[in-house]
Amino acid sequence: MAFVQIRDMSVAFGSAPALRGISLSVERGEALGLVGESGCGKSITWLAALGLLPRSAKVGGSVLLDGVELIGASPSVLEPVRGGRIAMIFQDPASSLNPVHRIGHQIAEALALHRGLTGAPARAEVIRLLDQVGIPDAKTRANAYPHELSGGQNQRVMIAMALAGEPELLVADEPTTALDVTIQAQILDLLGTIRRDTSMGLVLISHDLGVVSETCSRIAVMYAGRIVEQAESAAIFANPSHPYTRGLLGAMPPISGPRQKLVSIPGSVPEASRMPQGCAFAPRCSEAIADCTRVDPAAVTVEANHLAACIRATPAKTGTRTPERVLA
Amino acid sequence: MTASQMPLLSAQDLARTYSIRRGMAGRVTNVRAVDGVTLTIARGETLGLVGESGCGKSTTARLVLGIERPDEGQVRFDGAPMPGSGSPGWAALRKRMQLVFQDPLSALDRRLPVGLQIREPLEIHRMGTPAEQNARVAEVMEEVGLQPHHADRHPHALSGGQRQRAVIARALVTQPDLLVCDEPISALDVSIQAQVMNLLVELQERLGMGMLFVSHDLRAVRQISHRVAVMYLGRIVEEGAPDEILHAPAHPYSQALVSAIPHPGKTARRIVLQGDPPNPADRPPGCAFHPRCPVTAMRCRTETPLLKPRPSDGRRVACHVAQGEVAPGHVGQLELS
Ligand SMILES: Nc1ncnc2c1ncn2[C@@H]1O[C@H](COP(=O)(O)OP(=O)(O)OP(=O)(O)O)[C@@H](O)[C@H]1O
Ligand SMILES: Nc1ncnc2c1ncn2[C@@H]1O[C@H](COP(=O)(O)OP(=O)(O)OP(=O)(O)O)[C@@H](O)[C@H]1O
Ligand code: SF4
Ligand SMILES: [Mg+2]
Ligand SMILES: [Mg+2]
């Protein structure tokens, strides 16, 4: 069974459905990319799984961590998971580092909380972690305040804090979006190195298919609170089977070849309170047929390990066995 | 030089230094945001300006529009020196040069319907009768792909793409000769970015204006521009045709930028630059890129390379090594830290 198995998870704020049935699984040591445009529900998928949404959010469905249910679980179940077995780097780094504490102190707190380390061993571990994430002169820099570091360095500190609990899975929510391109390359490189060295799993959340494709072996594409396609990264690019995925790929300007008009997706993302009938993408979809506005499409297997939630997606020939993992 | 050969815009050796006060002691530091930028834009041409945060792109945009005065250097628009900001001559020129900003929501007044806001420049510059103004607003809205009924909507009742279209419509309503777009797509969703890029390319081809397209996204810059200038710490370090720069970057910094573009199925190794982006208040001597450069040679630490055509193929690049003036320095530099 998968390390994390999300089944039919839903989240609603008031009457607005923000997640409308997410099924997704993450294997041990796997790097999964979660992509989609602003507001499609990438962040709340993981906030809900870890019980971090405000009480006003109605959460349904199931999230199993190694077979243990997390939805509705008691604090004694959730606390060792958060920051321990599953660490999350939140989208807004400014809100996650405390400006009035030295960074070494903040990492030490995480070490005390998750591993019971204090005193000299904790100090040594802080320096090892800062070293691991590539902060030069870690001994001195441990005494710095967040504002004394660059954006890229603060992001490294966030990663060090996440690693403090020796997590089995790291959920990194847009860890490079606010950073310059050359610094983004450094951070992605770092995440790859850490994964190789620790066999930790990674969920990389991003709006950028390009960023995710280089780091992750599998990709799930979200639209309006649903996962509309998931497959191995190579298959997403070789055989995109949901029109929205094709739209995202077409919208990315190529870096070689003739310069042509981009295939853009008309219109914009629907609001949660005004979700269209049938397939939520239908009003923007160039391939929509009459049924698309009536039937909310279920995910079909287009080839092994490749699911698409589009009624026009062509199912695999009979006989292709679908591994349990993607069926989730 | 005949009028048709004369560039629409030419900027020569622009420099701009800001004095900022730091901390309680109020120590003043000088930030040389733009340090000797020379560029030209012809009618019907789009120049893409790329570079990382703080390298001086927006400052360059303000200088070429005359919104700010350069400390050194000169801007010429349509052959004549740029009048001082706020002068009557400048105010009259503003209708011929317009600016589109990054965030459409903050560029628009939330209390007013967008139709009125699109019309506003016509009123400011007293262009046409009210009836002519109505007709022009309707025309420009159609040009940018807005529906007539959108005119009555407030900004928050439009989608992100529609808002940026409204901002572009307002910039185009006076039929400017020069359009400066400062990160016009960065705040937009991916699918909307493509809509706006298509629109800018199409409008530029149809209306023939000159355009300065500022972005940190090399893919977008390639899509839109006829020529690309790469900026690093206040200077243009390389300039050329988009595909020359993307496929055979000459400057080590351009090489790193190009190799950092994420793309599916990438096999080439990424050049991961060591170190942080530089601080413009503490500009390294010599080539400002030398502390991060994988091929720094001795001369790079002391002598600032000039932007000039390189002997081998005429590419304009400011680098001692790319120019073939010195041999590449120790490549082991890459593995530092
Ligand atoms: N606390 C909340 N109360 C009400 N609505 C919320 C709350 N948190 C999130 N939402 C809504 O849920 C939807 C999904 O939000 P989420 O933050 O998961 O999007 P996202 O895919 O991470 O987007 P982005 O790329 O902008 O980070 C959005 O429409 C958002 O406005
Ligand atoms: N009005 C100002 N006062 C003081 N410093 C300024 C001012 N405007 C810009 N700067 C500084 O000048 C440098 C260049 O800034 P500029 O905004 O031109 O960069 P940019 O390339 O547009 O960056 P970004 O990609 O982040 O928009 C920065 O260090 C910035 O902090
Ligand atoms: S001049 Fe020297 S330091 Fe600067 S980019 Fe060229 S090789 Fe690197
Ligand atoms: Mg988010
Ligand atoms: Mg700027």
Image (cartoon, coloured by chain):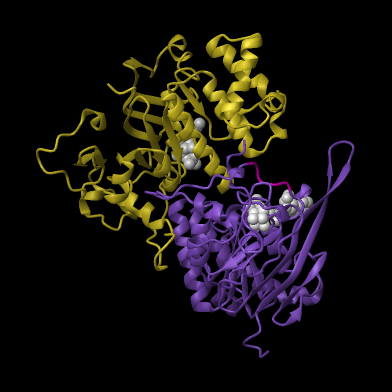
> Residue B125 colored magenta?
no
Q: Position of residue A72 (x, y in %)?
A: 39, 16
> In the rendered picture, chain B carries what hue?
purple
Q: In the image, is B291 to the left or to the right of A89?
A: right
Residue B297 screen position, x and y as percent: 67, 53
Q: Residue at x 69, y 23 (%)?
A: A139
Query: Can you tell which quarter of the image residue A207 is in?
Result: top left
The secondary structure that dominates the magenta segment is loop
Q: Is residue A19 above or below residue A143?
A: below
Q: Could you tell me residue B21's position as x and y percent?
A: 85, 44
Residue at 42% x, 21% y: name it: A168
* Closer-to-camera residue (B198/B72): B72
Tell me the residue at 59%/47% (across/down). Answer: B331
Q: Magenta residues, as a range?
A: B275-279
Residue B69: x, y in percent? 80, 66
Q: Is residue A191 left or right of residue B3?
A: left
User: Viewed as shown, does residue B75 lie left or right of A138?
Assistant: right
Asked if one can make out residue A174 in the rendered structure from this viewpoint, the answer is: no
Please determine whether, in this image, residue A58 is positioned above or below residue B307: above
| Depth order, front residue of B144/B330 | B330
Would you say residue B278 sits in the magenta stretch? Answer: yes
**Chain identifier, yellow in the render:** A
Could you tell whether B210 is left or right of B282 in the image? left
